[in-house]
Image: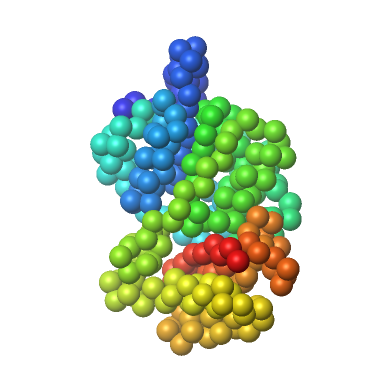
Amino acid sequence: MQSITEIKSLRSQIKAWRQAGLSVALVPTMGNLHRGHFSLVEKAKNLADKVVVSIFVNPMQFGENEDLDNYPRTLSEDKQGLAELGTDIVFTPSVETIYPNGLGAQSFVDVPDISLGYCGGSRPGHFRGVATVVTKLFNLVQPDYACFGEKDFQQLQVIKTMACDLSIPVEIIGVPTMRDVSGLAMSSRNGYLSDEQKATATVLFKALNTCAEQLKNGEKDFVKLESSAKQSLEQAGLKPDYFEIAQRDTLKTATIEDTQFVILAAAYFGGVRLIDNIQVEI
């Protein structure tokens, strides 16, 4: 596995692969890798001849009072895990490499409508930062495929929309959420929780499943379902940020005529913001 930090070296290797007729898949990450990330790499390896994994804690997608400085960084362990999977390149640029003129002077990519609400409402500017850095990575790697986890469902839809709107020739692949045996969605931020808190946090996935089953059983009062789910989270000690039933592809508010839904949820627990979702087809 090659470990590359500079753009020139990355582009040189990508060019050589292209000249050899090889396909390329990209897995963008912020590091602190777990089995969920590794499942993205495994999917990428099934899709393309060569796999590039980027590790970059992107300051542009963190807002005020968020955990940028404390975000877990485990580069040595991450590289070991990626090497064992047969990753071809791990790209670990510095902030200065990605934003040479500083964040204040950086051009940005803003994806309207689908970036609003949910995590976009709770974290203003977050998806602008995500869309900007992912666009830069797409330009640097020029992948045939890019793999993203479905746990960050709004992020996945934002990136799909952005790639389509900007005519970026990359196929965006959503990879199902990896979960602990308890059902808790794997996340780098789970490391902030104690074992007891992790056990309690499974109520988020349970609430999603309960809501999904009620939808499948014909319940059409979405407001009632959402309110009941929030109440169950509060009773377990979580503070709901949002719990909403939406149209799967547009993320607009669901209607009773819809048949494809995504239930999106976020809640605070022990100072940690947890997100999860479940897709439902009627």
Image side of residue 23 versus residue 170, left or right: left
Q: Is residue 80 above or below residue 208?
A: above
Q: Residue at x 39, y 73 (%)?
A: 202
Q: Is residue 126 above or below residue 117?
A: above
Q: Is residue 226 visible?
A: no
Image quadrant in which the N terminus is located: top left
Of the pair 274 and 263, the residue shown nearer to us:
263
Image side of residue 108 versus residue 238, left or right: right
Q: Quadrant of residue 63?
A: bottom right
Q: Which scheme is used to colour this image of the protein? A: rainbow
Number of marks in the image?
0
Of the pair 221 and 13, the residue shown nearer to us:
221
Q: Residue at x 44, y 29 (%)?
A: 48
Q: Is residue 126 above or below residue 282?
A: above
Return the x and y of residue 229 as percentages of the image width and height.
53, 80
Q: Quadrant of residue 154?
A: bottom right
Return the x and y of residue 156 as percentages of the image width and height.
57, 50
Image side of residue 282 versus residue 164, left or right: left
Q: Is residue 153 visible?
A: yes
Image side of residue 51 versus residue 245, left or right: left
Image quadrant in which the C terminus is located: bottom right
Return the x and y of residue 204 as percentages of the image width and height.
45, 73
Return the x and y of residue 231 as percentages of the image width and height.
53, 86
Q: Residue at x 58, y 63 (%)?
A: 281
Of the pair 259 and 11, the residue shown nearer to us:
259
Q: Residue at x 71, y 63 (%)?
A: 252
